[in-house]
Amino acid sequence: MAEQKTALIIGASRGLGLGLVQQFSQLGWQVTATVRTPSRADELKAVNGVKIATLDIDSNESLAALGQQIKNQVFDLIFVNAGVLGPEHQSAAAATYQELAQLFMTNVTAPIRLAEALVGQLRPNSGVLAFMSSILGSVKNPEGNNLALYKASKAALNSLTNSFICSLPEPRPTVLSLHPGWVRTAMGGPNAEIDVATSCSGLAAQVQRFAGKGGHHFVDYQGQTIPW
Ligand SMILES: NC(=O)c1ccc[n+]([C@@H]2O[C@H](COP(=O)([O-])OP(=O)(O)OC[C@H]3O[C@@H](n4cnc5c(N)ncnc54)[C@H](OP(=O)(O)O)[C@@H]3O)[C@@H](O)[C@H]2O)c1
Protein backbone atom coordinates (compact mmCIF):
# COMPACT_ATOMS: atom_id res chain seq x y z
CA MET A 1 0.00 0.00 0.00
CA ALA A 2 1.31 3.50 -0.85
CA GLU A 3 2.49 5.62 2.08
CA GLN A 4 -0.05 8.23 3.23
CA LYS A 5 0.75 11.68 1.85
CA THR A 6 1.25 14.57 4.22
CA ALA A 7 0.39 18.26 3.95
CA LEU A 8 1.08 21.31 6.08
CA ILE A 9 -1.50 24.03 5.44
CA ILE A 10 -0.79 27.46 6.87
CA GLY A 11 -3.78 29.68 7.71
CA ALA A 12 -6.60 27.15 7.87
CA SER A 13 -9.18 28.58 10.28
CA ARG A 14 -11.67 29.46 7.52
CA GLY A 15 -12.08 30.27 3.83
CA LEU A 16 -9.67 28.67 1.36
CA GLY A 17 -7.28 27.32 4.01
CA LEU A 18 -10.10 25.36 5.65
CA GLY A 19 -11.26 24.24 2.20
CA LEU A 20 -7.78 22.94 1.37
CA VAL A 21 -7.70 20.93 4.59
CA GLN A 22 -11.10 19.42 3.79
CA GLN A 23 -10.02 18.66 0.22
CA PHE A 24 -6.70 16.98 1.04
CA SER A 25 -8.28 15.04 3.92
CA GLN A 26 -10.93 13.72 1.52
CA LEU A 27 -8.10 12.65 -0.77
CA GLY A 28 -6.70 10.57 2.09
CA TRP A 29 -3.79 12.82 3.03
CA GLN A 30 -2.64 13.33 6.63
CA VAL A 31 -3.05 17.07 7.15
CA THR A 32 -1.41 19.34 9.71
CA ALA A 33 -3.20 22.71 9.73
CA THR A 34 -2.19 25.92 11.45
CA VAL A 35 -4.46 28.61 12.90
CA ARG A 36 -3.83 31.75 14.91
CA THR A 37 -6.54 31.01 17.47
CA PRO A 38 -7.41 27.33 18.02
CA SER A 39 -10.43 28.26 20.17
CA ARG A 40 -12.01 29.78 17.01
CA ALA A 41 -11.42 26.78 14.72
CA ASP A 42 -14.49 24.60 15.26
CA GLU A 43 -15.02 23.81 11.57
CA LEU A 44 -11.39 22.77 11.24
CA LYS A 45 -11.62 20.56 14.34
CA ALA A 46 -14.54 18.77 12.69
CA VAL A 47 -12.28 17.51 9.88
CA ASN A 48 -11.48 13.86 10.51
CA GLY A 49 -7.86 13.18 11.50
CA VAL A 50 -6.52 16.72 11.11
CA LYS A 51 -3.67 17.78 13.40
CA ILE A 52 -3.97 21.40 14.49
CA ALA A 53 -1.02 23.63 15.38
CA THR A 54 -0.87 27.30 16.34
CA LEU A 55 0.85 29.89 14.16
CA ASP A 56 0.66 33.63 13.75
CA ILE A 57 2.69 33.83 10.57
CA ASP A 58 3.84 37.37 11.42
CA SER A 59 5.64 36.24 14.57
CA ASN A 60 9.16 34.81 14.58
CA GLU A 61 8.56 33.27 18.02
CA SER A 62 5.39 31.58 16.83
CA LEU A 63 7.23 30.20 13.78
CA ALA A 64 10.04 28.86 15.96
CA ALA A 65 7.50 27.12 18.21
CA LEU A 66 5.79 25.53 15.19
CA GLY A 67 9.20 24.39 13.94
CA GLN A 68 9.80 22.58 17.22
CA GLN A 69 6.35 21.00 17.16
CA ILE A 70 6.71 19.55 13.66
CA LYS A 71 10.44 18.84 13.84
CA ASN A 72 11.51 15.79 11.79
CA GLN A 73 8.17 15.55 9.95
CA VAL A 74 8.31 15.25 6.18
CA PHE A 75 5.66 16.89 4.00
CA ASP A 76 4.57 16.18 0.44
CA LEU A 77 3.04 19.64 0.44
CA ILE A 78 3.63 22.86 2.34
CA PHE A 79 0.91 25.34 1.36
CA VAL A 80 1.15 28.92 2.62
CA ASN A 81 -2.38 30.22 2.34
CA ALA A 82 -2.65 32.91 5.05
CA GLY A 83 -3.22 36.38 3.68
CA VAL A 84 -4.93 39.72 4.26
CA LEU A 85 -6.47 42.37 2.02
CA GLY A 86 -4.87 45.40 3.62
CA PRO A 87 -6.48 48.76 4.41
CA GLU A 88 -9.90 49.50 2.95
CA HIS A 89 -8.70 52.66 1.18
CA GLN A 90 -6.04 50.70 -0.85
CA SER A 91 -4.34 54.02 -1.59
CA ALA A 92 -0.56 54.43 -1.74
CA ALA A 93 -1.00 58.09 -0.89
CA ALA A 94 -3.17 57.43 2.17
CA ALA A 95 -1.34 54.36 3.49
CA THR A 96 0.30 54.58 6.88
CA TYR A 97 3.56 52.92 7.82
CA GLN A 98 1.66 50.55 10.09
CA GLU A 99 -0.86 49.54 7.41
CA LEU A 100 1.88 48.80 4.87
CA ALA A 101 4.02 46.96 7.40
CA GLN A 102 1.07 44.71 8.30
CA LEU A 103 0.08 43.98 4.70
CA PHE A 104 3.59 43.29 3.44
CA MET A 105 4.61 41.33 6.52
CA THR A 106 1.66 38.92 6.32
CA ASN A 107 1.41 38.58 2.53
CA VAL A 108 5.06 38.80 1.47
CA THR A 109 7.80 38.48 4.08
CA ALA A 110 6.23 36.01 6.50
CA PRO A 111 5.36 33.39 3.83
CA ILE A 112 8.96 33.37 2.58
CA ARG A 113 10.41 33.33 6.09
CA LEU A 114 8.25 30.28 6.80
CA ALA A 115 9.35 28.64 3.55
CA GLU A 116 12.99 29.25 4.42
CA ALA A 117 12.50 27.63 7.81
CA LEU A 118 10.61 24.56 6.56
CA VAL A 119 11.74 23.88 2.99
CA GLY A 120 14.13 21.19 4.25
CA GLN A 121 11.12 19.18 5.45
CA LEU A 122 9.65 18.73 1.95
CA ARG A 123 9.82 15.19 0.62
CA PRO A 124 12.89 14.93 -1.59
CA ASN A 125 12.17 14.86 -5.35
CA SER A 126 8.38 15.09 -5.13
CA GLY A 127 7.56 17.68 -2.41
CA VAL A 128 5.61 20.79 -3.47
CA LEU A 129 5.93 24.26 -1.95
CA ALA A 130 2.79 26.27 -2.72
CA PHE A 131 1.96 29.90 -2.06
CA MET A 132 -1.51 31.43 -2.34
CA SER A 133 -0.87 34.20 -4.79
CA SER A 134 -3.51 35.92 -6.94
CA ILE A 135 -4.01 36.76 -10.59
CA LEU A 136 -3.98 40.34 -9.29
CA GLY A 137 -0.27 39.82 -8.60
CA SER A 138 0.36 39.60 -12.36
CA VAL A 139 2.10 42.92 -12.97
CA LYS A 140 0.41 43.81 -16.28
CA ASN A 141 -3.08 42.82 -15.11
CA PRO A 142 -5.24 45.96 -15.61
CA GLU A 143 -8.04 44.63 -13.34
CA GLY A 144 -8.65 45.20 -9.65
CA ASN A 145 -7.13 48.63 -9.20
CA ASN A 146 -9.48 49.23 -6.30
CA LEU A 147 -7.18 46.69 -4.58
CA ALA A 148 -3.91 48.39 -5.57
CA LEU A 149 -1.99 47.72 -2.35
CA TYR A 150 -3.15 44.11 -2.16
CA LYS A 151 -2.15 43.64 -5.82
CA ALA A 152 1.31 45.03 -5.05
CA SER A 153 1.66 42.63 -2.12
CA LYS A 154 0.91 39.57 -4.29
CA ALA A 155 3.31 40.78 -7.03
CA ALA A 156 5.94 41.20 -4.31
CA LEU A 157 5.18 37.71 -2.98
CA ASN A 158 5.75 36.26 -6.46
CA SER A 159 9.03 38.15 -6.76
CA LEU A 160 10.32 37.18 -3.33
CA THR A 161 9.33 33.57 -4.00
CA ASN A 162 11.46 33.65 -7.15
CA SER A 163 14.44 35.13 -5.27
CA PHE A 164 14.10 32.54 -2.52
CA ILE A 165 13.87 29.58 -4.89
CA CYS A 166 16.76 30.76 -7.04
CA SER A 167 18.94 30.96 -3.92
CA LEU A 168 18.35 27.29 -3.06
CA PRO A 169 20.88 24.67 -4.10
CA GLU A 170 19.82 22.04 -6.63
CA PRO A 171 17.78 19.88 -6.52
CA ARG A 172 15.06 22.44 -5.80
CA PRO A 173 11.47 21.62 -4.88
CA THR A 174 8.58 22.23 -7.23
CA VAL A 175 7.13 25.63 -6.40
CA LEU A 176 3.64 26.88 -7.21
CA SER A 177 2.31 30.43 -7.03
CA LEU A 178 -1.41 29.70 -7.23
CA HIS A 179 -4.48 31.77 -8.11
CA PRO A 180 -7.56 30.19 -6.49
CA GLY A 181 -10.10 31.97 -8.71
CA TRP A 182 -12.41 34.64 -7.32
CA VAL A 183 -13.85 32.71 -4.40
CA ARG A 184 -16.77 33.28 -2.02
CA THR A 185 -14.96 33.75 1.32
CA ALA A 186 -14.77 36.61 3.80
CA MET A 187 -12.09 38.11 1.54
CA GLY A 188 -13.66 37.32 -1.83
CA GLY A 189 -17.15 38.42 -0.75
CA PRO A 190 -20.59 36.96 -1.52
CA ASN A 191 -20.58 38.00 -5.20
CA ALA A 192 -17.43 36.07 -6.09
CA GLU A 193 -17.59 33.62 -8.98
CA ILE A 194 -16.94 30.22 -7.39
CA ASP A 195 -17.30 28.42 -4.07
CA VAL A 196 -14.51 27.20 -1.83
CA ALA A 197 -14.93 23.51 -2.74
CA THR A 198 -14.62 24.20 -6.50
CA SER A 199 -11.49 26.27 -5.97
CA CYS A 200 -9.86 23.82 -3.56
CA SER A 201 -10.50 20.72 -5.65
CA GLY A 202 -8.85 22.56 -8.57
CA LEU A 203 -5.92 23.70 -6.43
CA ALA A 204 -5.39 20.15 -5.15
CA ALA A 205 -5.39 18.90 -8.75
CA GLN A 206 -2.64 21.40 -9.63
CA VAL A 207 -0.53 20.31 -6.65
CA GLN A 208 -0.79 16.69 -7.76
CA ARG A 209 -0.19 17.55 -11.43
CA PHE A 210 3.04 19.45 -10.75
CA ALA A 211 4.51 17.18 -8.02
CA GLY A 212 7.95 15.99 -9.09
CA LYS A 213 8.05 18.26 -12.17
CA GLY A 214 10.37 20.92 -10.69
CA GLY A 215 10.37 24.64 -11.58
CA HIS A 216 8.31 27.61 -10.39
CA HIS A 217 4.84 27.92 -11.96
CA PHE A 218 2.19 30.66 -11.72
CA VAL A 219 -1.11 28.91 -12.45
CA ASP A 220 -4.77 29.15 -11.53
CA TYR A 221 -7.00 26.50 -9.98
CA GLN A 222 -7.91 25.25 -13.46
CA GLY A 223 -4.28 24.85 -14.51
CA GLN A 224 -4.10 27.92 -16.76
CA THR A 225 -0.67 29.58 -16.78
CA ILE A 226 -0.73 33.24 -15.68
CA PRO A 227 1.82 35.74 -17.04
CA TRP A 228 4.12 37.06 -14.34
N1 LIG B 1 -11.05 34.75 -1.93
C1 LIG B 1 -10.51 35.07 -3.10
O1 LIG B 1 -11.23 35.35 -4.09
C2 LIG B 1 -9.01 35.09 -3.28
C3 LIG B 1 -8.51 35.35 -4.56
C4 LIG B 1 -7.12 35.35 -4.75
C5 LIG B 1 -6.29 35.06 -3.69
N2 LIG B 1 -6.80 34.82 -2.44
C6 LIG B 1 -5.85 34.51 -1.37
O2 LIG B 1 -6.24 33.30 -0.74
C7 LIG B 1 -5.78 33.28 0.63
C8 LIG B 1 -6.95 32.92 1.55
O3 LIG B 1 -7.96 33.89 1.35
P1 LIG B 1 -9.47 33.68 1.78
O4 LIG B 1 -10.29 34.19 0.67
O5 LIG B 1 -9.70 32.32 2.30
O6 LIG B 1 -9.55 34.76 2.96
P2 LIG B 1 -10.15 34.72 4.45
O7 LIG B 1 -11.42 33.96 4.47
O8 LIG B 1 -10.11 36.15 4.87
O9 LIG B 1 -9.05 33.86 5.27
C9 LIG B 1 -7.78 34.37 5.51
C10 LIG B 1 -7.03 33.34 6.32
O10 LIG B 1 -5.70 33.85 6.56
C11 LIG B 1 -5.44 33.74 7.97
N3 LIG B 1 -4.48 34.76 8.42
C12 LIG B 1 -4.51 36.08 8.22
N4 LIG B 1 -3.46 36.67 8.84
C13 LIG B 1 -2.76 35.67 9.44
C14 LIG B 1 -1.60 35.63 10.26
N5 LIG B 1 -0.92 36.75 10.61
N6 LIG B 1 -1.16 34.43 10.71
C15 LIG B 1 -1.82 33.30 10.38
N7 LIG B 1 -2.94 33.26 9.64
C16 LIG B 1 -3.42 34.45 9.19
C17 LIG B 1 -6.81 33.94 8.61
O11 LIG B 1 -6.78 33.51 9.96
P3 LIG B 1 -7.72 34.17 11.12
O12 LIG B 1 -9.01 33.41 11.09
O13 LIG B 1 -6.94 33.97 12.36
O14 LIG B 1 -7.90 35.63 10.77
C18 LIG B 1 -7.66 33.08 7.68
O15 LIG B 1 -7.52 31.72 7.99
C19 LIG B 1 -5.17 34.64 0.88
O16 LIG B 1 -3.77 34.58 0.73
C20 LIG B 1 -5.78 35.51 -0.23
O17 LIG B 1 -4.97 36.63 -0.54
C21 LIG B 1 -8.14 34.82 -2.22
Image (cartoon, rainbow, N blue to C red):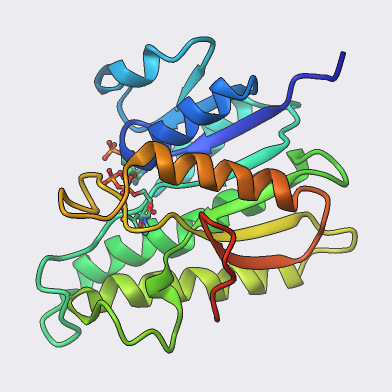
Residue 2 seen from this side: yes
Residue 117 seen from this side: no
Residue closest to the eye, 79 or 57: 79
Q: Is residue 13 left or right of residue 9?
A: left
Residue closest to the eye, 169 or 176: 176
What residue is rendered at 54% in x and 74% in y? 226
Q: How many marks?
A: 0
Which quarter of the rendered picture does the C terminus lie within? bottom right
What residue is rendered at 23% in x and 52% in y? 187
Q: Position of residue 176 (x, y in %)?
A: 63, 58
- Tell me if residue 99 comes above or below residue 78 in the rendering: below
Q: Is residue 76 left or right of residue 102?
A: right
Q: Position of residue 181 (x, y in %)?
A: 39, 58
- Tell me if residue 12 comes above or below residue 93 in the rendering: above
Residue closest to the eye, 193 or 77: 193
Q: Is residue 70 left or right of residue 159?
A: right
- Tell me if residue 60 comes above or below residue 70 in the rendering: below
What residue is rendered at 44% in x and 85% in y? 139
Which quarter of the rendered picture does the N terminus lie within? top right
* Quadrant of residue 223 within the rendered picture: bottom right
Q: Position of residue 189 (x, y in %)?
A: 17, 51
What residue is rendered at 40% in x and 47% in y? 82
Q: Position of residue 191 (x, y in %)?
A: 16, 54
Q: Is residue 14 left or right of residue 29?
A: left
- Tell me if residue 166 comes above or below residue 195 in the rendering: below
